Image (cartoon, coloured by chain):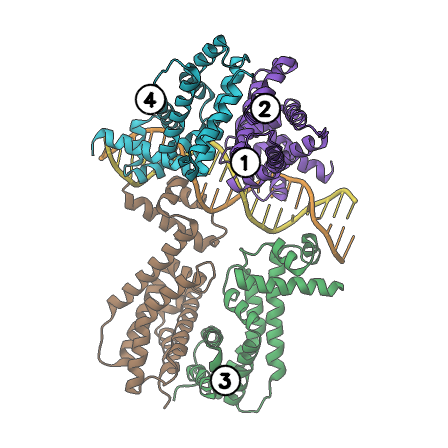
Chain colours: A cyan, B purple, C green, D brown, E orange, F yellow
DNA sequence: GATGAATGAGCTTTCATTCAT
DNA sequence: AATGAATGAAAGCTCATTCAT
């Protein structure tokens, strides 16, 4: 087993246990045992349990950001681009249920330091903010405060993934996919 | 100090500390001390720290539900009623920032058992579901799955309160109030 | 419910719980609750939990002593009298399994202060000691140290009752009754 | 100090304190402190205070069994063998007063789970049962139920050790040693 | 006599972290 | 890098007892 293997095994196990039992109910001893390493090994790779959580949080957020940015196909038409992003993001969530469940639990939780959460949020939603401002300039997006709209975006995304994770079969139905985007887009779009 | 006083002092102190420090960082000894009672008294009224949290969670949810139901003034026009409810709910949140912060932290947290959160959710959002179905029958609300719309409602409400708590001065401005309702209502309304 | 009733209910409940769960695992609150009285009431009748145990111990020992003394029918023949006593004692044990189980658990346990156990022992086995000495004078009982023989008596009695409580049906069979007495008597009798 | 040393130090200290103060009056902190280890170390080696007690109970019973089995010198004559065993067992008890006191207190106490006591009993007294049956076949041992005779053996042994521990000087006197065996053997022997 | 809320010292157990090997 | 026995401060919780009503 290589060095990377052990570190990765610790991260994989921590993700699984943090989601299944919560951060505080998961002991470092349990993570080490189920990852097949000694307790001391965990602390060779991460200086503390909090640092392990932080690493997990940021790396998963980054993985998510990379995935949806990689799938972007700018069409020149804002609504079309928004729809593509929305579906990319939901696809990633559906394909990575464990990581999505992790977001549901910890995106808003004080378990992860606020500063870290803010950093991740700004990184990911930073370009979302840019898109909103572009759309407002074009008159396509409603002219409300950007911060309010970003919060709304995030809130609707968490709500949508929660629904699709709770009702997994519905994601196969085009009507439900469309519905989730329509809810989102109607809120954001400039009122006619 | 009457019996009710001590129990209430424990609940008030627990709310304050759970919000300020988080559930796990708050010791039962600290709650008791700051509430002015002995540690044993806390456990006389609540069998465990978890049970105290649960009681707190359910009673605040109930208080919220009672408040907005009490303020309802059915007008016969759905959008008007929705707006009144939305503002009532936001008003309550603005007036009870500690309790709203409690919701932000614990509404989705595994700190509170899922079953308890579900129970609270169904109790509070139960009548919201009814309203959505009525609106759909009338053709005023978009004909999407009710569960999806309930999750969306909840997500948007948490996002809006987060925004207004983070930017307290904006709640005084009519335009921001209107904006938050418009975001919500455009999502819910039947697309034209 | 009269005063005596409450005190008696406490004693009955304590006996039951001490036997079922042990002294330390039984809380005074549990005794009071199951006896149908308030916790304070227990401490009106007994100054402490230890005092309750002591009262229980001595009163049951006394009840046992009274029962076998009352049934005595001196025949002038020592072996016959011993057999009668042995069967009386076993009868009482069989008829009062809860109290006998209490003896099994607490006759030798440091839960009851040594001084109290000694007092009870001397009261009950006092007249046994007298009988042993009489028998030794007559040459019917083996001429070993009286303290050794008393301990032996007590040990055999506890062993016999344990056997009959564990195997309740055997007490109906004359052969088993005879066997238990023979074991006892052969030990005590002057070797031929 | 080796690993074994710390675990053994905990066991030695626990034995000493359980006998001197009783199980419930002995705190895990006191055991750890007097054993010269941290409280956590105790729980590193034993999952709970009860588990520590159980380990102690079984290992001492085993030590006793090993000792008397090791000293056995089958002579071909049953009474002679029984006498040798009886004296071996009493010798062990006299030589290990702490462990014998432990037996007196906990052999019948609900502090140790009944199942554990049964297991120890069957292990130790198992070969005693075999000897009884052999003796009955030969007509040397009284033809009473084996379980009754085993209980009687155990009861007499506890009574004898209690006597010799309470009166330590008597064990030096051949007459008392003989007396204790005679009491035992007369009970067990086939009546003439 | 009866009540039961209140007490608080003290308990067992936990667990992130260290460090000698 | 890897190990896992050892640590000890601190946690949640218990429960015999008191006392104002």
Q: Residue furthest top?
A: A137
Which residue matches tag 3?
A: C172
Q: Position of residue B32 (x, y in %)?
A: 61, 34
At x 52%, y 35%, the residue is B145
How crowded pointer 2 is (Cα within 10 Å; few <14, some 14-19, many 20+) is rated as many
**Front one among A79 and D35:** A79
Q: Which mark is residue A71?
A: 4
**Element under label 4?**
helix
Which residue matches tag 1?
A: B146
Whole-angstrom CA distance, mark 2 to mark 4, is 31 Å
Whole-angstrom CA distance, mark 3 to mark 2, is 85 Å
Which residue matches tag 2?
A: B185
Q: Is residue B178 visible?
A: yes
- Marked residue chain, label 1: B
- Marked residue chain, label 2: B
**Element under label 2?**
helix
Disc 2 with disc 4 on a shared chain:
no
């Amino acid at each position: 087993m290589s060095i990377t293997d052990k570190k990765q095994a610790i991260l994989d196990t921590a993700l699984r246990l943090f989601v299944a039992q919560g951060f505080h109910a998961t002991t470092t001893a349990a993570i080490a045992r189920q990852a097949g390493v000694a307790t001391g090994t965990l602390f060779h790779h991460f200086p503390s349990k909090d640092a392990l959580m932080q690493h997990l949080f940021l790396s998963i957020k980054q993985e998510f950001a990379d995935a949806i940015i990689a799938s972007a196909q700018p069409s020149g038409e804002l609504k079309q681009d928004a729809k593509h992003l929305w579906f990319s993001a939901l696809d990633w969530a559906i394909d990575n249920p464990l990581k999505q469940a992790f977001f549901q639990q910890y995106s808003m939780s004080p378990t992860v330091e606020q500063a870290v959460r803010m950093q991740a949020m700004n990184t990911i939603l930073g370009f979302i903010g840019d898109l909103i401002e572009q759309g407002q300039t074009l008159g396509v997006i409603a002219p409300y405060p950007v911060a309010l709209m970003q919060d709304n975006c995030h809130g609707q995304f968490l709500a949508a993934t929660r629904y699709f994770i709770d009702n997994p079969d519905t994601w196969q139905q085009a009507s439900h996919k469309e519905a989730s985007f329509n809810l989102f887009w109607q809120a954001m779009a400039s009122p006619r």
